[in-house]
Image (spheres, helix red, strand yellow):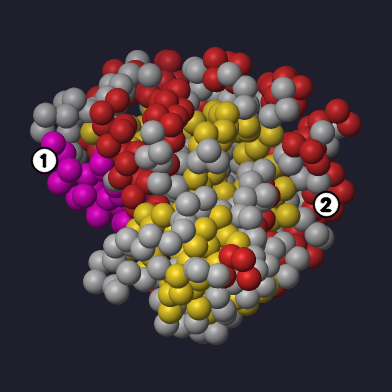
Amino acid sequence: MRGIIFILLVTNFSLKAEVIHLTNIKGYSHDGQQLEQLDSLLFDQESGKLLAAKPEYLKGATVVDGKGQVVLPGLHDAHGHILNYGLSQQLVNIQGLSSLKKTLQKTQRYTTEHVDYPWILGRGWNHVLWDGKAFPNRYDLDQISKDKPIWLERVDGHAGWANSKALEIAGINRETAKNDDLILKDAEGLPTGILIDNAMSKIEKHVPVISGDMKRKAMNLALKDLAAVGLTFVHDAGIGQDSYDIFTELASNRQLPIRVYAMLASGSADYEKLFKKGHLNIENHFMVRSVKLMIDGALGSYGAILHEPYSDKPEMRGAYVQTPEQIKTKLDELTKADFQANVHAIGDRGNTEVIDLLTRNHMKTSKLRHRVEHAQILRLQDISKFKQHGLIASMQPTHATSDMNMAEDRVGSERIKGAYAWQKLFDAGVVVASGSDFPVELINPFHGLHAAVTRQNHNNQPAGGWYVDEALSVEQALQSFTINAAFAAHADAFSGSLEEGKQADFIVVDQDIFTIDPKDIWKTEVLETWVGGKRIFKKAGKE
């Protein structure tokens, strides 16, 4: 479909006509092969679908002047965590703070404001942003409280920081921790309060259960925020029973504003029960046909599995979250049930092992569209395997600009050549689907588009871009956040581009990302967000 697009700019749509013809807009859409520019659209209000500009549809249609507005397909986030994001906005949110002092001050304020809370919980600290880049310790949090347990997850969710009271409750001391390398210890063998990946469960099993009401509130808050930044479709990377039930209820009652493609969390207590339910699709709004697995941790906390030791910590190579044997068993089960496998892999060894497991002959890789989530540090010889076997690379552009201050320290000047290698993957013909991994990163997809195109942070640093040869064009970046991501969710038949027969999911934005200076892409504001022909967000004060 060429040359058609639709948007309503009125505050309340009360026209009785079922077909709208919007003219005079500046639209863009990528069909997976090429970028198309659109100047008008025909839209069936009742079905929510886009129509071809045929005379029988145009006759009697209501004409609306788009007034030159810029319109894009609704954006996907191919890897996010909706409930975790919502909860992060209600607990201690210490993301992006530039010092230990500021982190402690914000945590202290939260503790003072919530004296009735039995635990102080939060997320977002990142020691790599602080002077010295050293991990914090239990005694820092003891300054806030020695009597109330405090537990703060690192920004990537792959490490946690406990005070002495939380360690005491969990029974973590010199003796119980001495044989666990994932519990960091000081020179005297005492736990520092930092727990990595699987060790985090020793604390988490003692944390009070978050109420269903609080989870519902968090979910609704998250869905509202996602719509406001132009996300019409999110791939939720690992859900349990709580999210499954909330999404099912919302979608069944037609109250789920955006589309959600959920991956069952293979490590959750509810996994087997949810997996046995099989595929689920509620009106293309809540879809379940994939499973999230996880081979390793994160680069920032030294949990990513590497072939060779870390360049800045030679005694470490990372650690398994799920072993290759555990992943193999689950892969065979889910493939037999026609579930897509979406496997978290950060380190180069983790990626090699995951790729080898996914490309075995019986995996039905092309049919099921198996994905490597993050595909962050790749050996150059592994890149061609993605295209050869039909694997999808599900990647997060803002990870590069967040990690650039430590990534090369971790892996060195040679291994970095296969890191955050978006353009190498595009050049190899691989389907790259983009997301953010929120709440690890901020939810705004225009931050991801900006990072993909510039390889710079919002201060335009580093000059010229970080390993700029891996930067994408604006066209490639939009493709990765729309049609490629839709393909990665088995949703390309109805989502990802503005084509005849697809759902009318689109956004109106305040600037043309194809003509502005790329350094300003992250500043793009969403004026309206539409899903299935219904406006779910309108920026206040915009007519």
Q: In this view, does 188 lie above or below 284?
A: above
- Measure the alpha-carbon separation of dots 1 and 2: 54 Å
Measured as percent of width and height from the top left, residue 468 is found at: 65, 73
- Picture quadrant of residue 296: top right
In the depicted view, which residue is nearer to us: 22 or 228?
22
Give the vertical position of 4 relative to 45 (above or below): below
- Queried whether the magenta region covers residue 412, the answer comes back as no
Quadrant of residue 309 within the rendered picture: top right
Near mark 2 (Cα within 10 A), the count class, few <14, some 14-19 or many ≥20, is some
What secondary structure is marked by label 1? Answer: helix
Residue 97: x and y, percent? 32, 56
Q: Please name the amino acid that badge 1 sits on.
A: Thr
User: Left or right: 380 with respect to 109?
Assistant: right
Q: Give the quadrant of residue 366.
A: top right
Q: Which residue is drawn at 58% across and 25% down?
A: 266
Which dot, 1 or 2, sits closer to the camera? 2
Front-most of 173 and 292?
A: 292
| Residue drawn at x 62%, y 39% as measured from the top left | 344
Q: List the residue tagged with mark 1.
A: 112
Is 102 a magenta residue?
yes
Classify the position of the N terminus by image quarter.
bottom right
Among numbered discs 1 and 2, the one appearing first in the sequence: 1
The kind of residue tagged 2 is: Lys
Quadrant housing the C terminus: bottom left
Is the residue 467 above or below the residue 26 in the image? above
Q: Which residue position is annotated with label 2?
A: 387
Position of residue 508 in the picture relative to residue 267 (left or right): left
Q: What stretch is highlighted in magenta?
A: 90-114
Label 2 residue SS: helix
